[in-house]
Image: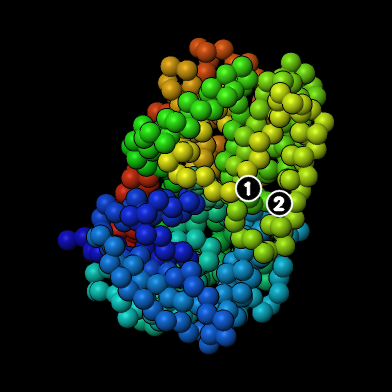
Amino acid sequence: MVGRLVVVSNRVGDPRKAAAGGLAVALGDALAVSGGMWFGWSGKVVENGPRGEGELHVQQSGKVTLATIDLGREDYDAYYAGYSNRVLWPVFHYRLDLADLDAGFFDGYQRVNRLFARKLLDLLRPDDIIWVHDYHLIPLAAELRALGCQHRIGFFLHIPLPPPLILAAIPAHEWLMRSLFAYDLVGLQSAADLAHFSGYVIAEAGAELLPDDHFRAFNRLVRARAFPIGIDVNEFQALAETPESMEMRDTLREQYARRQLLVGVDRLDYSKGLPQRLRAFQRLLANYPENQQSATLIQVATPTREGLAAYDEIRKELEGLAGQINGDYGGLEWMPVRYMHRTLARRRLPGLYRAGRVALVTPLRDGMNLVAKEFIVAQDPQDPGVLVLSRFAGAAEQLSEALLVNPYDTGATAEAMQRALRMPLGERRERHQALLGRVCEHDVHWWRRGFLQALASAERAVG
Ligand code: GDG
């Protein structure tokens, strides 16, 4: 018999509610199918709460048990805002310039992982299979093992794993990488990430590569593989048929009947390359003036991690650029950039994608990027839009029929936008058909099954 699935992630989403954010969407889908437990932070911060402690709440949502803990202010600041988002997020996205290596953050990160391990252990059944998600919880398995936990535990990293030299900028890099060996399986998004993992553990830890993607080091055995995450294609196609989605598509098509729409949907994060994208769009208008009075960029930038300096800065930069482009090129009849700093209802997203002739998915670095896949699924196969995709998104490994760009190269990105806007129907259909096939085949269910099968069959060290 297959054991109960226990998912652990920083944030716990209610699978019955529509959620924003790739991780919440993917896991909600996964748990709703099999049932199980979802464990993580409640989202509540207790001012003056004790360090390393937090109240546990357990509730049932359909087939899923939701177990969440509150965090004290000091723990939250060090673990979440600090180590996770000011050290691991920037470094894993190759942004050493934005990393803040304050040693205090590290203690809080360890403390909260220890707290999670303690609380989770009490809730476990003997045959549970544990699936830990993302960079907030890298040392969780090591903390569980220290308490005697023998369960099968898998880890999936949703963000990129950088090359060894960049990883080594984290003072605790050896400790972090060693703690991955407390898992039975480590899943990464792409072949590039996997190469970085194996490069690091072989060079720095003298790991031995064994059959079936197993590595031996630190007296432990771990299996490591790439499992590129997908979307729930059926669910997203159904969403595209809802009245809200169709209304969105029709309204935009009507408003922009004589123009061409480019769309972008991202969390407002510096990894998403938004200022670079706007500069490339500005270059498009300058270099190819036939797009003036016509090409319009709708950019949704969903608020995220507000209050962290790097995020406040990128917001200002983006607003400045949008204002500048509109000021330079816009008129009473036409505004080139429609920028929205808010969350759009999920039901309206497919309609927005469908109205777009071109999608701009141009992160500087991204683990996968689900927006690229959602855009493909939302298109009309008879008259599909074109995906302009950064070669630095994990998705680029799978979506090679998109127009791949280097988002740092403003001129080349503008040129790709122009090519996308002018692409003949036959070529658009051909590319879309190939992309859709791949997104459908490698959907979120394929991803979940692949990961859980590899976890169940991973070799374990004896003793
Ligand atoms: C991390 C990794 C990896 C966005 N704006 C709105 C909205 N969204 C939804 C999108 C999509 C999701 O959020 C974003 O997913 P991404 O994959 O693009 O990016 P991250 O949030 O950074 O996710 C990433 C992912 O984890 C999964 O492993 O692909 O690389 O960074 O589903 O549609 N949804 C709604 N309103 C918005 O305004 N409702």
- Nearest to N terminus: mark 1 or mark 2: 2
Picture quadrant where residue 360 is located: top right
The answer to whether residue 302 shows anywhere in this view is: yes
Q: Which residue is mark 2?
A: 315
Whole-percent x, y for residue 16 in the image: 33, 55
Q: Farthest residue to the right: give it.
A: 328
Q: Farthest residue to the front: give it.
A: 332
Q: Residues within 10 Å of mark 2 (few under 14, many from 20)?
A: many
Whole-percent x, y for residue 264 in the image: 60, 37
Q: Does residue 93 sit above or below 440 in this rendering?
A: below
Name the residue type under label 1.
His
Q: Farthest residue to the bottom: give it.
A: 50
The answer to whether residue 300 is left or right of residue 242 is: right
Q: CA distance from mark 1 to mark 2?
A: 9 Å
- Residues at badges 1 and 2 in contact (C-beta under 8 Å)? yes
Q: Does residue 254 sit above or below 264 in this rendering?
A: above
The answer to whether residue 205 is left or right of residue 4 is: right
Q: Residues within 10 Å of mark 1 (few under 14, many from 20)?
A: some
Q: Residue at x 66, y 79 (%)?
A: 104
Depth check: give the residue in front, 446 or 254: 254
The answer to whether residue 225 shows anywhere in this view is: no
Q: Residue at x 80, y 34 (%)?
A: 327
Q: Residue at x 78, y 45 (%)?
A: 320
Q: Which residue is mark 1?
A: 341
**Quadrant including the C terminus:** bottom left
Question: For the residues carrying marks 1 and 2, which lies nearer the camera in this image?
Answer: 1
